[in-house]
Structure formats: C-alpha cells, structure tokens
Image (tube, rainbow, N blue to C red):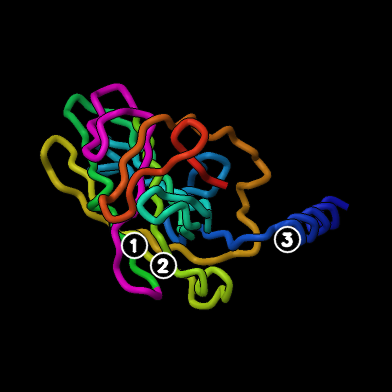
Amino acid sequence: MKAILLVCLAVLLGACASKPTFVPEEQASATLGGRTAARYLLPSDYDVQADVKIASFGFTEARTKNHNGKKVHAIQLRINVANEGDQPVSLDPRDQIVEGPTGRHGPGFARSNAGELPQIVVPPGSSRTVELYYPVPEELVKSHDATDFDLSWKILVGGVEFTRVTPFHEVAIDPAVAEQEFAEELAYAWSDPYWGPWYGFGGWYVW
C-alpha cells in the first residue's frame, strides 16, 4: 500500500509540474530550501572549515530595467556556505560558472541574505546564502532538450582557493520537494551591469 501511495504521489506531482527540475548527480546528501542539494565539507570530512550546499530551483523568469521590462528566462541556483572554522570564508557570485548547452556563463543576477554583494564574506560561526540566476534562451526552456549542466564553483577558505564541479541533471520530480522546507528570506541584490537591477516588490520580480 505504501508503494502504491508513493507512486500516486509521484504521478500527481509530475502532472502539476510545469517547469523542469534539476538535481545534483553527486554528493546529493542534503537539502536546501526544500530541494535536493549537493554537500561538500572543505577542506575535508575530517577537517571541516566550510560546509557548502548547492541546489537548483529549475527555470524561472524575471524582468530587468536594462531590458525595458522584458522577461528573462534563467536557471536558478542556490548556494549556502556555513563557516565552521576560525578563518574567514568568502565567495564571489561572478566566479560561479554554469556550463551547458549554450556554453560557459557567469550569473546575470545574484541576491543574498547579506549585503556584501558581489563579494560575500562568511565570518566564523555564521552562514550566508546566495541565489544565482543564469539567463538562458527561451527556446531552450520550451524545448527541454539537453538541459543538463555543470556548475563550476569556487570559494576561499582561510585564503586557500577550493574549486569543484557539481553536475546537474533533469528529473521529473525532485525527491526533496515533498519536504517543503522554508526558503530563506533574501533581501540584498547584485546584478551584472549588462542585465541591470531587478525591480518589483521589494526590489525583486521573480515568479
């Protein structure tokens, strides 16, 4: 009976899903904002200075002032970094690169729960969350073809640079969606000069 209920739930969620969902192909041992997240302990599992979680929220749409209010389609990623050591940890949204069907791209927009953008510093004993938006062509969103991608990311832990690649692939349902975790409230913003600032309620216009 339990198996039947799980199958029914999957069918219902799949019927309601209107946008692709992406999950990490490796290190998928955590959740972030109700989504399956890859987790990395740096520099190692035995000497944890930084706890990094990365999740995708699929495709979203936004409007920007520089583009006269035109809708921009984007892949939405979230990175949470917790400083578990006694040295500063930092990351720059511009160093987080997506590689997919349209090539290699930095984020067009970013927002965070702290106001240091674009450079984000995570003091010892605290955490920071940054949300990244990578503009993609509308045709790609509609076609759902070859939408798997890799995130090449970089953070500094005590002045030492760590780089990793997190591959994402498309699935019908994110296994963690049913958990319905509450997303963090993100109040500050940064945008690439080409795309310009977001606008709307609270400075944001995201659906």
* x and y, in percent, of residue 148 in the image: 46, 70
Mark 1 Cα-neighbour bin, 10 Å: few <14, some 14–19, many ≥20: many
The dot on residue 149 is 2
Magenta-highlighted residues: 101-127
| Contact (Cβ within 8 Å) of mark 1 with mark 2 | yes
Look at label 1 and name its amino acid: Val
Please give the name of the residue rendered at 65% of the width and 58% of the height, measured from the top-left corner. 173
Q: Report crowding for label 2: few under 14, some 14 to 19, many 20 or more residues within 10 A (C-alpha).
A: many
In depth, the one of 62 and 121 nearer the eye is 62
Question: What is the secondary structure assignment of the residue under circle 2?
Answer: strand
Residue on which the image places disc 1: 98
Using the rendered image of the protein, determine whether residue 100 is visible from the camera's viewpoint. Answer: yes
To which quarter of the image does residue 203 belong? top left
Q: Is residue 179 above or below residue 17?
A: above
- Residue pointed to by mark 3: 14
User: How many numbered marks, from 0 up?
Assistant: 3
Q: Residue at x 21, y 38 (%)?
A: 119
Among the two numbered marks 2 and 3 on one chain, the one whose residue lies closer to the N terminus: 3
Q: Amino acid at mark 2?
A: Phe
Q: Residue at x 33, y 68 (%)?
A: 99
